[in-house]
Every structure is written in C-alpha cells, then in structure tokens.
Amino acid sequence: MKAVIAIIMVFVGCCSVNVFLELLVKEEPSSGHLITFAQFFTIAFEGFIFTARCGTRKPRIGIKDYIILVSMFFFANLCNNYAFNFNIPMPLHMIFRAGSLITNMIMGILILNRKYTFSKYVSVVLITLGIIICTIQSGKNVKSTARNDENESQVQVFFWWILGIFLLTLALFVSARLGIYQEVLYKRYGKYPREALFYTHLLPLPGFLMLYDSIYQHAVSYSQSAPITIPLLYVGVPKMYLYLAGNVISQCVCINSVYVLTTECTSLTVTLVVTLRKFASLLFSIIYFQNEFTLVHWLGTCLVFAGTLLFTEVVHKLFAVTEKTKQS
C-alpha cells in the first residue's frame, strides 16, 4: 500500500511541478532565479527540521565534498530554469531533459572508462535522434517569450533560442558529471540521499545574493499580479505567489515520493514510473496549455521515450518478471 501511494504521489507531485512551472513562466519567463530560490529555500528548510534535526545531526559526508557537489547542482538548476528566458517552450524543455541518459553515458565513458552493451548505444542513438528532430522542428517556428517582443527581429528571437538550447545542453552535461561525482561519494561514505538532498539545497543559498536584483524585481512583479481569493478565508493573494507556492509544495511532494518509491520498489518500477510520469507531464502540457506540437514533434518524442525504455531495459525486465510469475 505504501508503494501504491508513493506511485500516485509521484504522478500528482511531479506532474503538478511542471503545471505550476508553466503557469509561472508563461507570465514571467525570466523569473527562473526567483523560482529556483524558492525551491531551494523550502527544501532546505524542510531538511533542516526533519533531516538535520534542527542542526543537531552532523553530516556523514565531508563538507568539502558537498561544496563541489553543490556547485554543480546549483549551476545545473539555474541553467534549466533560466532557459525559459530564451524562448524555450515547455514541451521542448521536457524532451531535452529526458536526454540525460546520453550525457550520463558520455561522461561514464570519458571519466569512468565504462563500456556499454550494443542495446545501450542503440538506445542513445534513438534518444539523440529524437531530441534533434524535436529541436529542429521547434527551431522552424521560434516565438519570443519576452514581453517586449515587438522590438525583436526574428533573427534576434532565433539567436536567444539558440542560447537557450546551449543552456539546456550545458545543464545536461553538468548534471551527468554531478551524477558521477555522487556515485564516487556514495562509494566512499555510503548512501545518504536525504542528507545529500538537504545539503545540496542548503549550501547554495548564499549564492542567491548575487542574483538579488533579479529575485527582488520578480518578487515585486509577482506581488502586482491579479489577486485570487482563497475560499473560506476570503483573502486575495496575487496569483503568481499562489502558482509559486504550488510549484514549491509540489516539488517537495515529488522529491519525497520518489525517495519513498526507491525504498519500497525495485529500480525497474522506479524507472517505469518516472518515465511514464514524464510522458504524462508532456501530454498535459500539450493539451492543457495548447503548446504547438506537430507530427514531427511526436515522432521525436516517441524516439526519445522508446530509447529511454530500451536503455533501462524496462520491457525486457517486465517480460522476465511475467515469465517468472507464470512459472511460479
């Protein structure tokens, strides 16, 4: 029952994160710094109470190691959220981030000298081809996300889009390097995912001081958005702050649900649930927000998710589990 609840909450929490994020970036595409800060602060605050026990529990992993880990984590998150300021639509953002397996494999080969089976290389080719198809198709009709887009030429719009693609690509490689460094730390100290979650969100907080102007500017802009009356309380709250609260709360639910899922289920189940969740988020974004999505986009998307399933051997493992169940 605990696993079933975790699966449901992964879908509810993680899909809601993307819904509220899209509501935010459609209104304020350049407010990525404020969104990132709110997420980091909330998760760090929750971790301080429940994981660090209000500072009474010492970290099991060295702070110096955490600083290196945090630097990469902070940078990757900033790049991902700030990319919305450069004409990147949400569906393309989701598809791009699904390509993390590519960069993980590249980093594994270059840094850890790993070797992979033929099916892994085939899956990466499918994912890469799918992302390229979606990117090229999206590049044919780039739309500005800036409020003063009437002053921008199509060349300028396309230039900023290229910069957004570069940020997403850079974030993928940094995230892959982060994953490898985590593996090294887990082998050295043991696995403490809750502790790592806390410190990777706590230690970057001083870094947001460098982004104070942007955060303050968008906080003021959020406060000036149209108010929404909260039922029963009869209090009007700026809608952008409600969206931000929804995004942050959903992020906490998503992260904690995935953590429970990893402790209650096999890696096969976790991979399958996460993959299906990403696909559900993409469908919701296309249908509800009416984002442009052509047949070519669908072709690229299918290649990405087919490659992901092939890489994680979900289908093969499902058949194995089914055969084992029949024999028993």
Image (cartoon, helix red, strand yellow):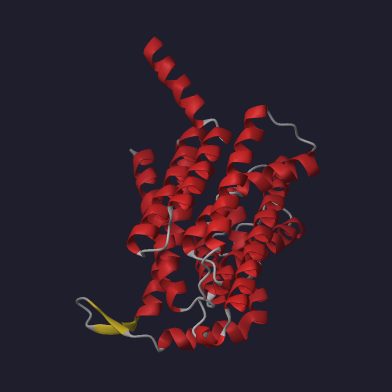
| Quadrant of the image occupied by residue 18 | bottom left
The residue most toward the left is 232
Residue 135 or 285: which is nearer the viewer? 135
Tell whether 210 sits left or right of 18: right
The answer to whether 145 is drawn above or below residue 70 in the figure is: below
Image coords of residue 229 (percent x, y): 25, 81
Tell whether 50 sits left or right of 325: right
| Quadrant of the image occupied by residue 116 | top right
Q: Is residue 152 visible?
A: yes
Tell whether 236 sits left or right of 156: left
Which residue is painted at 43% across and 55% down in the image?
294
| Quadrant of the image occupied by residue 62 | bottom right
Which residue is painted at 46% across and 38% down in the image?
272
Residue 38 or 260: which is nearer the viewer? 38
The answer to whether 55 is drawn above or below residue 146 in the figure is: above
Which residue is painted at 36% across and 54% down in the image?
12
Image coords of residue 156 (percent x, y): 62, 78
Residue 200 or 50: which is nearer the viewer? 200
Image coords of residue 242 (percent x, y): 37, 75
